[in-house]
Amino acid sequence: MKKLAILASLLLAAGCGAGSKGTGSADKPSGTAGGSGPSVTISLGGESNTPVAEVNGTPITEKELTDKIGSRLSRLQSQLFDLQMQGINAIVDEKVLETTAKKEGVSVQALLKKEVNDKVAEVGDADAQKYYDLNKARFKGKSFDDVKEAIKRQLIARQTAVFRNNYLDRLKDEANIKIFLSRPTVDVSVDDDPWKGGENAAVTIIEFTDYQCPFCARARPTVKQVMDAYGDKVKYVLRDFPLSFHPNAQKAAEAAECAGEQDKYWEYSDLLWANNKALEVPNLKKLAKDAGLDQAKFDQCLDSGKFTAEVQKDQADGSKAGVSGTPSFFINGQMLTGARPFEQFKEVIDTEIRNSGNKS
C-alpha cells in the first residue's frame, strides 16, 4: 500500500483523457474532538483480508479497498512500470557505455565523441532553409534569419540523437542484458467485438478507442504496422470507449456496429478515422452511403439506438480494467496507454510470443 503515494505522482502517455473528479474532502477529519462523528482508524494494509481501516469497530479490508480503487490502481501500476523501465533503460545505457569505454581505454565522453558526435554532419543554410519552408507555420511569422541558428541546432540535435540511439542499440545487442521486471496484467475480455488477425493467436491486443479522439486517429498507422508485421500471430480486437466530452463519439461507435451488421465494420471504421472531425449523424449516414451499405437498414439501426447498450458495455468494461483515456491497449492484459510508437508494441509482443513457445 505504501506504493500508492509513488503511483499517484505518475502521468499518462499522450492520449485523450477522461479525467476524474474527487468525491469528497479527503482532508476533512471525522469524529473530531467534542463531535458526534464515527470513530475512524487507519493502518497500512497487508494480506487481502488485513484491515486497512476501521469504522466503529467494523474493519475495511484491503480487498474492499482494491475493489473500490482497482481500476485506477491498475492504471497507475502500469505507469509505475513504465517509469521503472525508463530508469532501467537509462542505467543500462550508462553501463554499456562505461564497459565499452573501459575496454577501449578512453572516457565515456571520448567514446561518444568518436562514435556519435564526430559522425554528425554539418547543417548548412540550405538545409535550414528547406526545413523552414516545410514548417513555416510553426514559426508564427518569424523570418528565416530570425530562426536560422535555432533550426541548425535542432537539426544537429536530431542527428546526434539518431546516431547515439543506433550506437547504443548495437552495444546492447552485443551485451548480455536481462530484465526481471514484468508489466502488470489486467483481465480484459474480448467480448463479442470486431477482431482481425489470428483467431487463436498467442497474443491478443485489445484497444479501447474513441473515434473522435485525435490521439486514437494518430495511432492508426501504428496499429496497421503491428498487423502488417505480425499478421495471424496476433489477434487485434477493437472495443469502444467514447469519452463524455466528445459529443459525436458515442453515435460514431454505434454507426460502426451498424456497419458491422452488414459485414463492413472495418471498411466503415476506416472511413470514420479518415473523417473523425466530422462525425455528426448526417455525416455518419453519408459515410454509410460511401461504404456501399444498405442505406435504409443503416439509418434504421443508427436512429433506433440498437447498439447503444453494446457501446456502453464496452465502456463499462474498459473502466473496470483501468481505462480513463484513449487509446488504451491491452497486450495479453498488459496496458499501454496513449499513442505509442511501434517499437513499444513490438517489445511486448515479441516477449509474449517468446513466452508462448513460438518464435517470431
Image: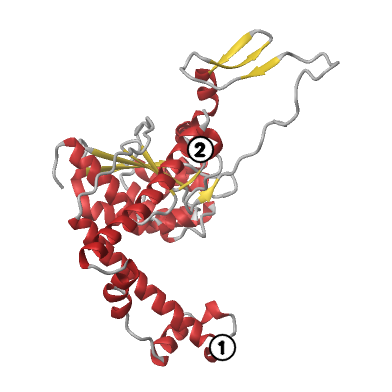
For disc 1, the neighbor class at 10 Å (few under 14, some 14 to 19, many from 20) is few
305 or 1, nearer to the observer = 1
Which mark is first along the chain, 1 or 2? 1
Query: Which dot, 2 or 1, sits closer to the camera?
Result: 1
- At 23% across and 60% down in the image, what residue appears? 171
Q: Position of residue 161 (x, y in %)?
A: 36, 69
107 relative to 35, above or below: below
Q: Position of residue 174 (x, y in %)?
A: 18, 57
- At 59% across and 11% down in the image, what residue appears? 59
**Colouring chosen for the image of the structure:** secondary structure
223 relative to 137, above or below: above
Which residue bears the numbered disc 2?
A: 305
Q: Is residue 65 left or right of residue 25?
A: left
- At 49% across and 13% down in the image, what residue appears? 49
| Total marks in image | 2
Which residue bears the numbered disc 1?
A: 146
168 or 188, nearer to the observer = 168
Q: Quadrant location of residue 197?
A: top left
Q: Which residue type does callout 2 highlight? A: Gly
